[in-house]
Image: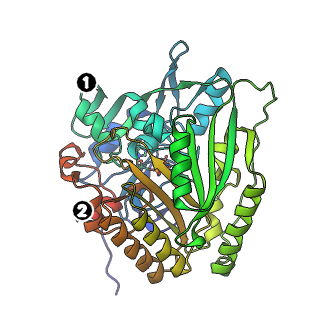
């Protein structure tokens, strides 16, 4: 006879954006109001809980396998806005796309935005996300003026540069482990409208990319490059740069793109199709090089135009590899690209950016001066994991780091090398919080 287990069945399958790893949760709390959160914290056991936003993290930092999540998406109210200063107070489940929809028509924009607008304010703070303007604006966390944090032992804790500043620094980039952010005050920035004066420039070597970055960082608020990672040691790519445009008098009609209805068959993605995509993408943009006026959405969020594009990678999902390497170490960077090109497991979306020297806003913030590269790889099991392990060796050797928001597999040693000060973060953790990522990289229970 089968023995009955005492624990409730694991039923709730929640995905991270890469759909790897696939894990089940014991329960997903869905509070509609902030005043429901304290009871959830009180009833939970040690390490039982993790806040969850829109699940746009690629790996397991937004998962809590076998335990519980607090889905914060219904905490999505705008609580206040100072027209004269642009200071916004909103609940943590408000998405960046909601903020743009409401405030861009009034002439305000996000101070920092990642490459998707489908991210909650709580998620943006907990990963201290960066954008194309890191070289002049730092990270999202450096524009957060005040937060209210639900803690299991202290109720609501207010944090700013004056009150509990250490808890603020721990929560920015704190991976959801210091408590549930109830609301945040964010300083928006004034813009003239929805248009960007954009420019795209093809490049054919890492040195040209670095020259373009140096030359552009003073004059352009936004810089980033797409990289053809099949090109090996001499990467080619397209350098994009832009500034918010003064009024162009054009009419603005936001567009909603198509949706990928189901996971595509795995055989569609192979070294030949991905290589062909990269070649076509390069030629397309090289042919359209030069200046143009673009709407903000295709400039900041080209991938948001196809909803559920992550299904492109099939049922096994994909992993993203994002590292930062101190600059300038062309040899290490070339070695990284060479290993990728030789593996034949290239990526559709290679993104390259030079981070600025802004001080880290959080104890565990990822951005630091250097070159960051982000690449997607279809999950093919052991060969994919081995490739990433071999990339880790190059990154570690160069004194670089891996981004937890994009990670599903780094080793404890790589985490230690990336965040040597992580132990100073531990005292700020809420004892009721844990995550699959945290247990994997620190060995915590
Ligand atoms: C297409 C795409 C492009 C991206 N581009 C970038 C980029 O350019 N730069 C960059 O930095 N990142 C980028 N990202 C990653 C993304 O910005 C981060 O992973 C972000 O944190 C996701 O937010 P989320 O709301 O989906 O949160 P989730 O992924 O659900 O959770 C992320 C973290 O936030 C915590 N959290 C969520 N809500 C709360 C809360 N209320 N209180 C406390 N903690 C909370 C969770 O516990 C978890 O640790 C990109 C992702 C995608 C899919």
> Could you say whether the residue bearing mark 1 is in a helix, strand or loop?
loop
**Circle 1: is it few (<14), some (14-19), or many (20+) Cα within 10 Å?**
few
In the displayed image of the protein, which residue is found farthest to the top? 84
Foreground of the two, 279 or 42: 279
Q: Hey, which quadrant is residue 8 in on the image?
A: bottom left
Label number found at residue 366: none
Q: Are marks 2 and 1 in contact (CB under 8 Å)?
A: no
Q: Give residue 152's quadrant in the image.
A: top left
**Cα distance, mark 2 to mark 1?**
29 Å
What percent of the width, then of the height, locates residue 43? Answer: 28, 46
Residue identified by numbered label 1: 163
Q: Which quarter of the rendered picture does the N terminus lie within? A: bottom left
Can see residue 22?
no
Label 2 belongs to which residue? 442
- 177 up-or-down from 182: above or below: below
Placement of 191 over or under 392, stated as above or below: above
381 vs 343, nearest the viewer: 343
* Relative image position of residue 438 (x, y in whole percent): 30, 59
Front residue of this view, candidates 114 and 326: 326
Q: Reading the chain from its start, which is encountered first: label 2 or label 1? A: 1
Extreme residue toward the bottom, this view:
1
Q: Dot 2 lies on which element?
A: helix
**Spot occupied by residue 50 in the image (x, y as percentages of width and height):** 36, 51
- Position of residue 49 in the picture relative to residue 295 (left or right): left
**Side of 108 where 399 appears, left or right:** left
Q: Position of residue 7 (x, y in %)?
A: 32, 66
Q: Considering only vertical position in the picture, is 43 above or below 4?
A: above
Q: Residues within 10 Å of mark 2 (few under 14, many from 20)?
A: some
Q: Residue at x 37, y 50 (%)?
A: 366
| Residue for point 44% across, 37% down | 140
Residue 60, quarter of the rendered image: bottom left
Q: Is residue 130 visible?
A: yes
């Amino acid at each position: 006879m089968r023995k009955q287990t005492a624990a409730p069945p694991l039923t709730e399958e929640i995905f991270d954006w890469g759909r790897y790893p696939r894990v089940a949760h014991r329960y997903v709390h869905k509070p509609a109001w902030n005043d429901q959160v304290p009871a959830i914290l009180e009833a939970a056991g040690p390490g039982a809980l993790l806040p969850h936003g829109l699940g746009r993290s690629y790996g397991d930092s937004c998962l809590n396998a076998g335990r519980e999540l607090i889905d914060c998406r219904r905490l999505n109210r705008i609580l206040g806005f100072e027209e004269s200063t642009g200071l916004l107070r909103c609940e943590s489940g408000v998405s960046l796309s909601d903020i743009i929809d409401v405030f861009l028509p009034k002439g305000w924009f996000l101070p920092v935005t990642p490459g998707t607008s489908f991210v909650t304010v709580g998620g943006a703070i907990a990963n201290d996300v960066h954008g194309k303007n890191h070289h002049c604006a730092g990270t999202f966390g450096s524009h957060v003026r005040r937060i209210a944090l639900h803690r299991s032992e202290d109720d609501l804790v207010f944090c700013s540069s004056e009150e509990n500043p250490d808890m603020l620094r721990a929560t920015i980039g704190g991976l959801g482990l210091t408590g549930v952010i109830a609301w945040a005050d964010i300083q928006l920035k004034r813009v003239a409208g929805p248009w960007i004066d954009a420019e795209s420039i093809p490049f054919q070597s890492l040195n040209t990319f670095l020259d373009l970055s140096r030359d552009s960082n003073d004059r352009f608020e936004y810089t980033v490059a797409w990289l053809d990672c099949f090109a090996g040691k001499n990467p080619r790519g397209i350098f994009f740069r832009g500034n918010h445009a003064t009024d162009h008098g054009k009419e603005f009609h936001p567009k909603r793109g198509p949706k990928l209805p189901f996971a595509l068959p795995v055989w569609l993605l192979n070294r030949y199709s991905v290589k062909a995509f990269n070649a076509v993408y390069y030629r397309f943009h090289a042919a359209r090089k030069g200046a143009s006026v673009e709407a903000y959405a295709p400039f900041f969020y080209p991938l948001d135009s196809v909803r559920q594009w992550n299904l492109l990678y099939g049922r096994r999902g994909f992993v993203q590899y994002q590292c930062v390497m101190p600059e300038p170490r062309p040899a290490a960077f070339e070695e990284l690209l060479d290993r990728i090109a030789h593996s034949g497991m290239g990526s559709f979306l290679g993104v390259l950016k030079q981070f600025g020297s802004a001080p880290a806003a959080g104890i565990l913030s990822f951005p630091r001066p250097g070159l960051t590269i982000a690449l997607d790889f279809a999950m093919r099991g052991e060969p994919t994991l081995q490739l990433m392990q071999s990339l880790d060796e190059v990154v570690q050797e160069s004194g670089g780091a891996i981004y937890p928001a994009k990670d599903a597999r780094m080793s404890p040693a790589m985490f230690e090398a990336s965040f040597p000060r992580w132990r100073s973060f531990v005292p700020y953790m809420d004892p009721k919080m844990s995550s699959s990522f945290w247990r994997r990289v620190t060995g915590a229970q």
